Image (tube, rainbow, N blue to C red):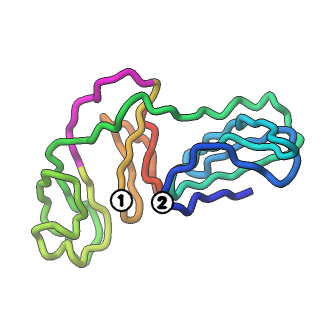
Amino acid sequence: YFVANHTANDFDGWLPLAVPFGSAVRYDPISGRSGRLTQRSEGAAMQLYVQLAAGETMILCAAAMDSRVPAWTYVKPAGEPVPVAGNWSVEFVEGGPKLPAAYPLKALASWTHAPDAAAQVFAGTARYTVRFATPRGDADDWWLDLGDVRDSARVRLNGRDVGALFAIPFRIQVG
């Protein structure tokens, strides 16, 4: 199955399937992660525990499968989201019709709001940079949520390439 959450809300719950199955494996087409989903019987129907963010997709293989596939890792927030705050800089790297001038930002925003009018018609690549302190808290992993991205993003953290995003939700595990 190809499953897409085309709602504005995250889904975190039990998903019934209309066909019988032995086990089910989730494949994330964006991150490449995979794992066996938790399942239960509810009357005559089988259900899978699924977490799917608004706009997120997955590939689901439900069949008489080998249950030795490692379990899917579910996400449980360790606290409230921590905004990435700081002074941003935007530098236009390549594209055209001409490269707009670099500029600073107090809060993250689209380059279409740049002070240089050339940004209004620019098509290409820009580099958004910010320095911030590691959030406080005890978590097994951190997620970086970029929010509203137009059309793709490559994420680097402390000089390390974390990955590329090209579909909603624009979030990625950063370690």
Q: Please give the name of the residue rendered at 81% of the width and 43% of the height, measured from the top-left corner.
A: 46
Tell me the crowding category of disc 1: few under 14, some 14 to 19, or many 20 or more residues within 10 angstroms, Cα based.
few
Q: Residue furthest top?
A: 138
Circle 2 residue = 8
Q: Is residue 18 magenta?
A: no
Q: Nearer the viewer, residue 12 or 123?
A: 12
- Residue 43 left/right relative to 138: right
**Element marked by disc 1:** loop
Place of residue 111 in the rendered image (x, y in percent of width and height, measured from the top left): 22, 65
Q: Considering the image in quadrants, where does the N terminus appear?
A: bottom right
Residues shaded magenta: 129-139
Q: Which amino acid, by three-letter code, is at mark 2? A: Ala
The residue drawn where x is 25% and y is 60% is 93
* Above-or-below relation of 87 to 72: below
Reading the image, the residue beneath label 1 is: 148
Labels 1 and 2: the sequence-earlier one: 2
Asked if disc 1 and disc 2 are in contact, CB closer than 8 Å, the reply is: no
Q: Residues within 10 Å of mark 2 (few under 14, many from 20)?
A: few
* x then y, percent, for residue 157: 33, 38
Which secondary structure class fits the magenta region best? loop
Identify the residue shown where x is 29% and y is 29%: 135
Q: Residue sitting at 45 percent across and 29 percent down?
A: 141
**As rendered, which of 124 and 79 lies closer to the eye?**
79
